[in-house]
Image (tube, grey):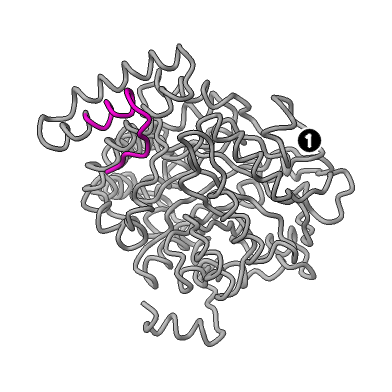
Amino acid sequence: MSSSPAIRRRLSGSAADFIDEAKLHGFLAQPAEPGRVREIIGKSLSKEALTVEETAALLTADDPALIEEVFDAARRLKRDVYGNRIVLFAPLYIGSECTNDCVYCAFRRSNRAVQRRTLSSEDIRRQVEALLDRGHKRLILVFGEHPSYSAGFIADCVRKVYAAQRPRASIRRVNINAAPMDHEGFAEIKSAGIGTYQVFQETYHHETYGQVHPRKTRKGDYLWRLDALSRAMEAGCDDVGIGALFGLYDWRFEVLGLVTHAIFLQTHYGVGPHTISFPRLRPAAGVCLDERYRVKDADFKRLIAVLRLAVPYTGLILTAREPAELRREVMEFGVSQIDAGSRIELGGYTEAGDAQVLEREQFELGDLRPLDDVLRQLIVDGYIPSFCTSCYRLGRTGEHFMEFAIPGFIQQFCTPNALTTLMEYLVDYGSEETYRAGVRLIEDELAKIPAGPRKTALLERLRRIRETDQRDLYF
């Protein structure tokens, strides 16, 4: 990969601005012909990624019946590619110091309403132990953008998280949401064993980006941020996540920006983003939100469905920013990962209980349910809650992940691993009600798996988890 012309050009200091605003707006100005929209839906159902122009046609269709066809196709594609699994994780905020002054964020440097804090080594240990005691196995560490949160500091935090232990439990995957770095910085955090590196462009619209991110701050350079995931991949971070903050500009334009970014990464590095996030603006301490581009629930549901059709093999992350009922509704037609039992105030897993402390949070959450409640609701709704990390730990990442995922072979790993991690949770952490519901679900899922060596091996792993102290038995 390092010998490609695109990478040599980037390593020499040049970075491309691949967001052509005129082209994207032009696509959105074209009326969507029903026949053309149905052709595009058919292409999606064959599990082919869409072009930006094709994605725009789905966004501009205005016939309610046609829009419902988009939703139906997204439901079907979600089932075909991901089955009924939902991957669970939790965020762990490490520090709220920040040199940026983003107008929508409570952590912005000029905001005197927020309390600043950076977790110590002991704080990190206590937070991770509390998360392990709840049943979590996957974390994303979140850092403000500040010189003290260097690549070395981040790598050290990752190692501390992996080192934390509880009986029969440790964190198996640590993802990162942190400031853009240079190649050396990305290589350093990769060496600490991170899973996915995630950074959001926030908005792909140049003028809006400049308005909400003052240019004299670290985040004020649009192109440095846009190029961040290219540098990350060149440095060896083969799993990366993109995202936009919906509510800063026209939601349809931002969808096209995300798809453009995904295609760019696929074209230049042989693999697209591992995940796409699409958070909406939320209230925050000391923040006055501009409601001009507020995304209504109906449009939010639609953008998720369109993203599912546009990028069939990319994980879609829906966070606890959204209320529980909306999260429950949109999971059926696109979402593959959610956080649960989340606290985003510094030290929140041991110090804040169930209350929100707005002066210590980046924004206000919409879903404060404990992990067990979220997990039980997923089970009742027919989903398999999964804490699986096997692909990352067995090298099925980046291009290798796509080799498995695109033909659909990943299904032979995902359902068995989801069932074993669910059984771990039920035995070690589940409430009585959740345990009963989860065991019934596992029995139902086992009945769908044909007899053979794989099922026999799965049954044996489930038995060992249920009857012994053995854990982390994955395919």
Q: Is residue 100 visible?
A: yes
Residue 282 drawn at (x, y percent): 69, 39
Q: Which residues are magenta?
A: 460-475
Near-viewer residue (371 or 456): 456
Task: In this rendered view, identify the residue nearer to me: 255 or 380.
Answer: 380
Q: Residue furthest right?
A: 112
In the rendered view, tell whether residue 327 sits above or below residue 430: below
- Work out which residue is located at the far left of the displayed protein and give it: 452
Q: Residue at x 36, y 63 (%)?
A: 271
- Dot 1 falls on a residue whose secondary structure is helix
471 falls in the magenta region: yes
Residue in view at x 53 percent, y 68 percent: 19
Q: Is residue 458 left or right of residue 98?
A: left
4 displayed left or right of 173: left
Residue 65 in view: no
Name the residue carrying label 1: 358
Say how many tags the image has: 1
Residue located at (60% from left, 40% from top): 128
Instruction: Provide residue 352's location: percent of width, then percent of height.
Output: 74, 30
Q: Is residue 254 above or below residue 381?
A: below
Residue closest to the eye, 397 or 6: 397
Residue lying at 57% horizontally and 44% vertically, measured from the top left: 164
Quadrant showing the C terminus: top left
Q: Is residue 235 left or right of residue 321?
A: left
Badge 1, how many Cα within 10 Å: few under 14, some, many 20+?
A: many
Residue 148, image x, y percentages: 75, 63
Q: Amino acid at mark 1?
A: Leu
State the image quarter where residue 324 is shown: top right
